Structure formats: structure tokens, C-alpha cells
């Protein structure tokens, strides 16, 4: 023992010894027993590797500010789904009544699981692979499954950004190119393009000018070079934003996270000034309370909560891992969750204000067209002039006057009414036309903007907003891949980022062939939903039932400086796993009940038609689900039968400067034998150092992290991160 140690000094002193072993160890210089004769693990000490681990812990990148981190989490969680998925679900599932199940599920599923992911990332300071290898090595496949799902989602998500880029550049012209049908020459006669005439100008521009779509998924049709170039631009933007890690992506988030809110507020103000906007908003928020009893509504609300917060992807864990360990991640979880919700409500107001305006325009168009039919029937004596109310003026016909005239004709001509081919032209029918996804963004919304004054300006703003929403989510999705891979395999950040973007672009070429939109639909519907649900259930089980909820709550208490609400204890241990299991079962049933298919655009009919996937496409679909889930059983089997070492079967006590690592298997709550993990000078000093029960050898339970992080609690002995798995 060193001559100047406190124990040695006591040996030569006549003073009565009153200090405990805890006090003595707390004042001792750290000794690394891996390097000494007390190393009982049989491991050889690798000085270079040991130094690299120390440097990795000390030099891990960190956010420049709390604001930058919050904006990154908001940018990741607030994506395209908030703009084009939530409003559709709200309209479909009872209007304002849908907000009730959504809020309930946000509180009992979304917030607790989001808090859990933030906490484990911040505590262990690793990406998803390292985090789950640490918490439960046998469930280490969770991290690899998250990476695969992120890869699948990133492939098609960036294609949507490419579409937005195409529309963005097409918006710099007046009139907008999708405002009118193109004129083609048939010999000496100029006629309107047949496909456009049968559908609409915006629909034609989307399916023919943008996608040049084939009639089915089986007809490849070759690459669409315009979309290929846009996809290349999209991946270049993502690569540039990610190349320096959070140093570059954090700066991008200042713009990509805040700009969409500027656009949404501008659209809301402009939308409220449009004629018919109030009709759309009233229709949106009129509650249909009977819908709240429909299980399907709750299933779709749970799915939306699940994907809105980005649970299971690994992006939340990756961003949180760059935080200081004394950061209040509970506040972050609550703030980001409810900002996400209010963003969805704001986007819904904007969408239905604009769609209310569009519905009024389309309804007026319907009235004019049908009034012309009625005039024709009057002139040919098919209808009698006596059927027309005397106050009706055809030159200034209102929707109310037309509806009155329509009811009279329908009553009198009941037997032959269908032959007249008249439409009711009800505003309610226009508002009930549900659109979501690309149909909302690239058809319905673009059509509405053609009627705006200064329409090119609003179009530029709208598609720039979509690009930024997509870019924020893509940065989080790519972080779910790059952070764990770089942490685990120590590859160069720049090389891996550039290489992964190039590889993803090459694979993503399947989405920019003429049948590419059908592959986007397939990946969107099936590549993530079921695998991610399983991933999040296993995350919950790993923390609550394997690592231990009480133990985890104690870790959080020491990390945050206060004890989280008991609400989280019960949601993590019981409520969330049960709800997620029900959601998974409902998703499997839904897959079985609804035969897999897609909406194909048939050029000759200028209409959509539902088609079933062919056998080879079904094979791809099933392979996506299996491949994304495969790491879960594979890693479990490899580690259960010790085909790959998980590091949990060796007794090692390692003291290092500033941290300590130990095996804590077989922990008993009442074990009187204690290891001194740290001396924790917290903000409210405790007379005794933090203690933990010693867990003897021979157990397979995972390693437990010490309770004394650097930063808020000063420099005590900290538990080292478990070495990354060899897998």
C-alpha cells in the first residue's frame, strides 16, 4: 500500500481508529486491479484499449446548449406524420373526440416510454446497441433491430424529401405548373390531355409529371431520372448535415426545427382569412362521441403516439447519449411530448382551414356545373319551369338556392331522377373526403394553393417546410444508425456517414423507378410497424423486469437529484407492457384481416384501383418483417448458449480514475456486505457515501451502473460502462 495512504498513516499512529471501511476506501487513491495481482477475471490488461476507453468516455461529443438538444429532439419527433397523418386520423376517427384517446395514450404509453429511452441513453451514454448490451446482453439484439428498422425507414423517407425538393423547384413559376391541364396537339387540333381531363390538374401532375407512374408494381418502367436526381440531392443534404455528427446536425436543427413553425403559423393566419376556412375547422373539431367506443380508434391512436415520438428507432437514445448526466431528462420528455401533440393540433388547424377553403371552391364549381345541366333540361323541356322556385337567379346561384331546387326536382321526378345525373353538391360531402399522406400534401393541398393569391410564394413555403420536417426526422433516423455503430465498432464518423449515405442512395433506386411509389407504400406499411412494436415491448421488459424497476428508479433519483413520480413505476412495470402487447396483437390481427395490397394508378382509367401484391412482392414484404426482427432471437440464442461472450459470467472488480466497474450478479436487497461505489458530494450533502449491495459471482444478470455520474455529483468513483459486446 502506498506510504502516504491513510491506512498506512493509521498504522503508525496512536490515535484511536473510528473511521469505517467506507471512509477509508473513499479516501484511497484509485487502483486498477485489472493491472494488479488481484485481477481474478483471467483477463489480460490491454493498455492501449484501456486508454481508448478512458478517452472515449471523456471525449464523447456533447450538445453545445440545452436549446440545441431540445430542438434536435423536436425536429426528430415532429415530422411529416404530424402534417399529413394526424389530421386524417382526427377527421376519420371522430374529430375532436379523437383527441381524448390520443391524449390518454400519450400519457400512459408515449410519455413513460419516451422518458425511459431518454434516461437510458443519458445514463449509459451509448447508442442503442451499447445501451441494450449493457442492460441485458441476451436482449442485445434490440439495438441491431433498431438499426435495421432505421435503415428501412430512412430508405423510403428520403424519397419523400426528394419529391418535396422536386415540387419546391417547380414552385418558382407563375402560374403553378399543376394549376391547369396541359394542352396536346392532335394534328391541327389542340385538345386537353385525356388523363388530366378525366382526373384533375394536380392529380395528373403528381402521377404523370412527377412520378410517371406505371400501372402496377410488376411494371418497373425503368428509372425516373428527375426523381433519381432529387433523391441524390436529398441524400447529399442528409450526408452534409450528419458528416460531423452532432456538431454539424445540431446547427442544422436550429433552422430545420424552427422554420416549420414559422410556416405553419403563416399558413394558419392566411388560412383563417380564406372563405370557408371556418367550415373546415368546425367540421374538424365537431366531436363524434360514439367513435370513442370503437377499438379501432384506440388502436390507430396508439400507433400514431408510438410513431410520432420516434420510439424504438434509436434516434431518441442516440441524441440523449450526448447529454450531461445531470440533465433533467424528465422535463425534456414532458416538454417534447406535448410540443409534439400541440404541433399536430396546429397542423390540423392549418390543414382543415385550407381544405375548408378548397371544399367551398369545389362545391361552388359543382353548383355551377349542375346548374348548367338544369338549364339544359329546362331548354329542352325535360324539366318544367314550374319546378324552379321564383326567387332563384341562375346568374347568381348560391349553394342554398341550388339545394332547394335539387330537393324539389328529386321529389317531383323521383322515378327518373337518376337519369338526370344531378349531384347534391353538399359542402359536408366535400369535407368528408378523407385524404392523407402524399394524397394530402401533393394533391389536395397543392390544389388548394392554386387558388391562393400569390400562390407560388405559398407553394415555395409549404414545400420548404416539408423538406425541413423531413430533414429533421432523417437526421434523427440516421443518428439511430450511425451513433450505435460508431460507438460499438469504433469506425471513423466521416467515412461511415458518407459510405452509408452512398449505399442507401444506391439501394433507394428501387423507389425512383416508375413503380417506385408502390415500394414506398410497401415499406411504409410493413417494414417498421410490427418490428418496432416488438422492439419497444422488449425495451420495456429489459428495464422494468430484468434490470429492475426499483433499481432503475433509484438510478434516476441519483442521476436527476429527485425521485420520479411513482406513476412511472407502475406504467413501466405494468401499464405500458400490457398496452403495447395489446397493440402488437391488434397489429397482427389487422395484417391477417386486411390482405396486403396497394392503390395503383391506372393510366387508361385515370383512377386509382386497389390491387393485391403479387407473390414475389409478398415475399419481399414478409422478408422485411423477418429481417428487421431477426437480430432479436439471433443474439439471444448466441448469448444464451455462450456462442458469443456477453461478459456477464466473470467476476471483475476494476477501479479506475474517476470510475469503477464490478459484477453485481446475485444482488440481495438485505445483503449486509457492501461495496463502496462512490463518494457523492451532491448538492444536498449526505453524511454517508452511496452504498450498493455486492452481488456475488455466478449470476447471469447484467452489469449495473454506479449511481455517481460526473458533472452534477462531482468526481467520485464512477462505474465504468460495460465493454461493448463482441457481436
Image (spheres, rainbow, N blue to C red):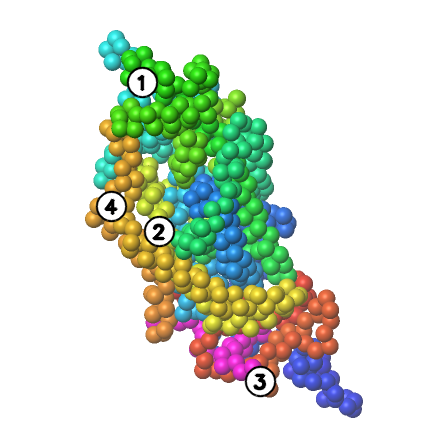
x and y percentages locating residue 589 in the rendered image:
32, 57
Q: Residues within 10 Å of mark 1 (few under 14, many from 20)?
A: some
Q: Position of residue 77 (x, y in %)?
A: 51, 48
Label 4 residue SS: loop
Q: Residues within 10 Å of mark 2 (few under 14, many from 20)?
A: many
Residue range highlighted in magenta: 643-670
Element class at badge 3: loop
Q: Earlier in the sequence, mark 4 or mark 3?
A: 4
- Whether residue 496 appears in this view of the structure is yes
- List the residue tagged with mark 4: 613
Q: Mainly helix, strand or loop, the magenta region?
A: loop
Nearest the viewer among 274 and 231 is 274
Q: Residue at x 66, y 65 (%)?
A: 561
Which residue extends farthest top?
188
Which numbered disc covers residue 527? 2
Which residue is the site of mark 3? 670
Reading the image, the residue beneath label 1 is: 383
Q: Earlier in the sequence, mark 2 or mark 4?
A: 2
Q: Residue furthest left?
A: 615
**Nearer the observer, 622 or 274:** 274
Amino acid at each position: 500500500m502506498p506510504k502516504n495512504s491513510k491506512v498506512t498513516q493509521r498504522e503508525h499512529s496512536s490515535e484511536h481508529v473510528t473511521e469505517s471501511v467506507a471512509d477509508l476506501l473513499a479516501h484511497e487513491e484509485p487502483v486498477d486491479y485489472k493491472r494488479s495481482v488481484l485481477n481474478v477475471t483471467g483477463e489480460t490488461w490491454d493498455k492501449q484499449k484501456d486508454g481508448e476507453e478512458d478517452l472515449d468516455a471523456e471525449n464523447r461529443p456533447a450538445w453545445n446548449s440545452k436549446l440545441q438538444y431540445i430542438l434536435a429532439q423536436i425536429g426528430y419527433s415532429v415530422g411529416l406524420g404530424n402534417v399529413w397523418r394526424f389530421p386524417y386520423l382526427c377527421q376519420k376517427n371522430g374529430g375532436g373526440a379523437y383527441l381524448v384517446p390520443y391524449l390518454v395514450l400519450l400519457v400512459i404509453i408515449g410519455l413513460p416510454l419516451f422518458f425511459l429511452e431518454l434516461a437510458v441513453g443519458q445514463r449509459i451514454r451509448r447508442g442503442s446497441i451499447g445501451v441494450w448490451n449493457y442492460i441485458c446482453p441476451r436482449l442485445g439484439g434490440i439495438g441491431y433491430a433498431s438499426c435495421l428498422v432505421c435503415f428501412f425507414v430512412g430508405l423510403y423517407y428520403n424519397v419523400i424529401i426528394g419529391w418535396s425538393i422536386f415540387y419546391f423547384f417547380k414552385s418558382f413559376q407563375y402560374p403553378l405548373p399543376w394549376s391547369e391541364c396541359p394542352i396536346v396537339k392532335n394534328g391541327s387540333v389542340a385538345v386537353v390531355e385525356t388523363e388530366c381531363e378525366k382526373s384533375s390538374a394536380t392529380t395528373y401532375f403528381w402521377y404523370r409529371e412527377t412520378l410517371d407512374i406505371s400501372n402496377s408494381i410488376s411494371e418497373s418502367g425503368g428509372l425516373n431520372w428527375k426523381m433519381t436526381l432529387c433523391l441524390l440531392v436529398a441524400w447529399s443534404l442528409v450526408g452534409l448535415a450528419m458528416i460531423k455528427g452532432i456538431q454539424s446536425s445540431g446547427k442544422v436543427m436550429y433552422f430545420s426545427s424552427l422554420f416549420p413553425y414559422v410556416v405553419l403559423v403563416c399558413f394558419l393566419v392566411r388560412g383563417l382569412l380564406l372563405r370557408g376556412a371556418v367550415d373546415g375547422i368546425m367540421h374538424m373539431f365537431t366531436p363524434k362521441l360514439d367513435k370513442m367506443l370503437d377499438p379501432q380508434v384506440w388502436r390507430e391512436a396508439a400507433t400514431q403516439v408510438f410513431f410520432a415520438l420516434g420510439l424504438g428507432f434509436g434516434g431518441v437514445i442516440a441524441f440523449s447519449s450526448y447529454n450531461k448526466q445531470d440533465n433533467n431528462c424528465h422535463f425534456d420528455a414532458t416538454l417534447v411530448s406535448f410540443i409534439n401533440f400541440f404541433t399536430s393540433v396546429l397542423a390540423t388547424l392549418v390543414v382543415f382551414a385550407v381544405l375548408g377553403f378548397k371544399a367551398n371552391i369545389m362545391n361552388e364549381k359543382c353548383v355551377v356545373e349542375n346548374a348548367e345541366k338544369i338549364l339544359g333540361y329546362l331548354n329542352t323541356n325535360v324539366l318544367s319551369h314550374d319546378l324552379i322556385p321564383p326567387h332563384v337567379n341562375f346568374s347568381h346561384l348560391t349553394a342554398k338556392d341550388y339545394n332547394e331546387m335539387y330537393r324539389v326536382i328529386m321529389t317531383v321526378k323521383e322515378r327518373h331522377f337518376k337519369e338526370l345525373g344531378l349531384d347534391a353538391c353538399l359542402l359536408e360531402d366535400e369535407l368528408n373526403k378523407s385524404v392523407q399522406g402524399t394524397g394530402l400534401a401533393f394533391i389536395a393541398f397543392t390544389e388548394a394553393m392554386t387558388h391562393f393569391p400569390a400562390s407560388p410564394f405559398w407553394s415555395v413555403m409549404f414545400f420548404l417546410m416539408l423538406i425541413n420536417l423531413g430533414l429533421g426526422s432523417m437526421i434523427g433516423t440516421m443518428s439511430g444508425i450511425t451513433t450505435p455503430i460508431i460507438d460499438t465498432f469504433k469506425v471513423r464518423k466521416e467515412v461511415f456517414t458518407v459510405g452509408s449515405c452512398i449505399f442507401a442512395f444506391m439501394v433507394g433506386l428501387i423507389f425512383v423507378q416508375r413503380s417506385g411509389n408502390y415500394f414506398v407504400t410497401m415499406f411504409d406499411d410493413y417494414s417498421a410497424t410490427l418490428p418496432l412494436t416488438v422492439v419497444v415491448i422488449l425495451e420495456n421488459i429489459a428495464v422494468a423486469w430484468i434490470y429492475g424497476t426499483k433499481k432503475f428508479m433509484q438510478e434516476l433519483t441519483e442521476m436527476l437529484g429527485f425521485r420520479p413520480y411513482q406513476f412511472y413505476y407502475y406504467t413501466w412495470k405494468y401499464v405500458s407492457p400490457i398496452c403495447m402487447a395489446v397493440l402488437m396483437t391488434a397489429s397482427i390481427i389487422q395484417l391477417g384481416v386486411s390482405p396486403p395490397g396497394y392503390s395503383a394508378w391506372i393510366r387508361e382509367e385515370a383512377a386509382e384501383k386497389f390491387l393485391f401484391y403479387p407473390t414475389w412482392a409478398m415475399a419481399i414484404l414478409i422478408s422485411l418483417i423477418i429481417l428487421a426482427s431477426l437480430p432479436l432471437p439471433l443474439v439471444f440464442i448466441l448469448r444464451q448458449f455462450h456462442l458469443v461472450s456477453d461478459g456477464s459470467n466473470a467476476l471483475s472488480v476494476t477501479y479506475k480514475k474517476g470510475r469503477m466497474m464490478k459484477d453485481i450478479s446475485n444482488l440481495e436487497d438485505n445483503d449486509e456486505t457492501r461495496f463502496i461505489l462512490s463518494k457523492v458530494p451532491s448538492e444536498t450533502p449526505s453524511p454517508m457515501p452511496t452504498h450498493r449491495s455486492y452481488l456475488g459471482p455466478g449470476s447471469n444478470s447484467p452489469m449495473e451502473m454506479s449511481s455517481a455520474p460526473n458533472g452534477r455529483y462531482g468526481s467520485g468513483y464512477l462505474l465504468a460502462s460495460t465493454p461493448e459486446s463482441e457481436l
